[in-house]
Amino acid sequence: MCIRWGSWNSTVCAVSSSFCWRSCTPTASAVTRSGYQRITDYIRDNLGGDLSLDALSQSLFLSKYYIAHLFQEKTGLSIHQYITKKRLAACVEAMQSGQRVSEVYACLGFLNYSRFYRAFLKEYGCPPSVYLQEHLAPTAAETQAPE
């Protein structure tokens, strides 16, 4: 079925009877998911850079209030807590691959060792050196030679 619209002679054809105009409009949850995904992708790609709420807002063209609300709703964490957790996880991964703590923390956005140390202690419950000893030291079963 075709319908002609006014003087432009544009034609709109219904392909099937089940077509609904609302199906072409993104739902609020789809928009929210894509906004959340854009933010998390940007954070992942820029862990060493400025990830303040103002910087995120300007880079992603989203309201900083929207970003803060969206993260609290989706993760139960503030945006700052989420970024800190991601930075610490990246630090642990780098340290486990052999990089030194002094090389890692500044590259991943921590302003100084004191801030990194306090955040690490709060997240993992022990200093970085102890964490690495516990997680990199071979277990007794791994060190025993097979009989």
Image: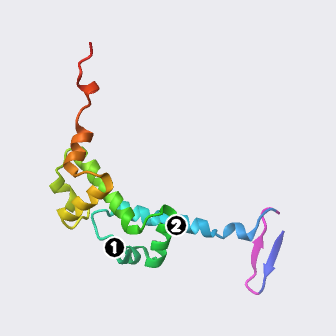
At horizontal 25% and vertical 40% (from top left) the residue drawn is 134
Q: Which residue is mark 2?
A: 73
Kindly identify which numbered label has been placed on residue 25. none
Sequence-first tag of 2 and 1: 1
At label 1, counting other C-alpha atoms closer than 10 Å, the crowd grade (few under 14, some 14-19, many 20 or more) is few
| Percent x, y of residue 118 | 24, 61
On screen, residue 67 above or below 132? below
Instruction: Please state, as top left, top right, bottom left or bottom right, where the C terminus lies in the image.
Output: top left
Quick check: is 123 in the magenta stretch?
Answer: no
Kindly identify the residue that appears in the image at 77 percent across and 63 percent down.
15
* Residue at figure coordinates x 25%, y 46% from the top left: 131
Instruction: Tell me the quarter of the picture where residue 132 sits.
Output: top left
Residue range (magenta): 7-17
- Tag 1: residue type? Ser
Determine which residue is flagged by label 1: 52
Whether residue 63 is visible, yes or no, is no
